[in-house]
Image (tube, helix red, strand yellow):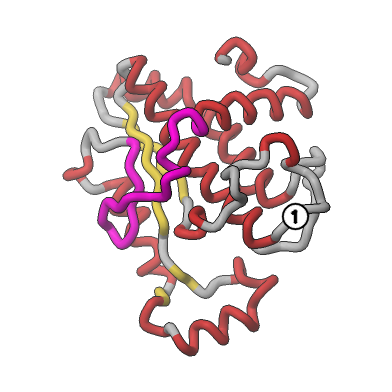
Amino acid sequence: MFCPYQLSEDEIELQFATNHIGHFLLTNLLLDTMKTTAKTSGVEGRILNLSSIAHIYTYKEGIKFDSINDICCYSDKRAYGQSKLANILHANELSRQLQEEGVNITVNSVHPGLILTNLFQHTALLMRFLKFFSFYLWKNIPQGAATTCYVALHPTLKGVTRKYFADCNEVTPSKLARDETLAQKLWDFSVKLINSVSKKNYLGFEDTI
């Protein structure tokens, strides 16, 4: 979070690689098993992406598809916002695909709240200063986990999908986060990016585009 410009081992901008691409790949590697389990058990599967209110503070175009790794216009804060926007777009597009397939799996995203953890290691002094003036907004770790647990487990959310939650309530994310075309474009971009840096074609991703 808010880290200086770095590339992952696969030469992808680190915040985008860590917060989106890794989660995108893991989800797709587990997806067939989840579909089978939901079908055979009759129990609804739930996928939950941990996003952030920071998704509203991203680059002008939302996702810098043409310059994802460029250092010249890198902003540590906007790069983080970009990755958190990607979490919501990923959830929305996956939900759309699963609904089209008639699969009994819901996909949502959440903002856990402001929690002072080592995520803030690159801006620790700034965050402590801000906390002094906004102490009533900050949560401890159990409070921060509440929305995640609620969306993942609460029976009243059965069948609820493609939504964004904060403080255990459904809220409306940014306009970019609700852009279906942007979500589909991110999906295709992520598939191509993973296959371009991999020696094998994970799950036949190229066939899903």
Give the answer, above or below, for where 194 lies relative to 59. above
Find residue 41 and report its horizontal and vertical position in percent: 28, 23
- Label 1: few (<14), some (14–19) or many (≥20) C-alpha neighbours in 10 Å: some
| SS state under label 1 | loop
Which residue appears at 47% of the width and 43% of the height?
A: 176
**Nearest the eye: 139 or 100:** 100
Residue at the (46%, 23%) spot, across then down: 33
In the rendered structure, the answer to whether residue 59 lies left or right of residue 138 reads right
Whether residue 163 is in magenta: the answer is yes
Over which residues does the magenta segment extend? 162-183
Q: Which amino acid does the dot numbered 1 rest on?
A: Tyr
In this rendering, the answer to whether 115 lies above or below 204 is: below
User: Residue beneath label 1, please?
Assistant: 74
Q: Is residue 99 above or below residue 17?
A: above
Expressed as whole percent of the image width and height from the top left, the position of residue 190 reads 63, 30
Choose top left, top right, bottom left or bottom right for residue 147: bottom left
What is the quadrant of residue 139 in the picture? bottom left
Return the residue nearer the eye: 147 or 52. 52
From the viewer's perspective, tell me whether residue 63 is left or right of residue 176: right
Name which residue lies at 67% across and 36% down: 65
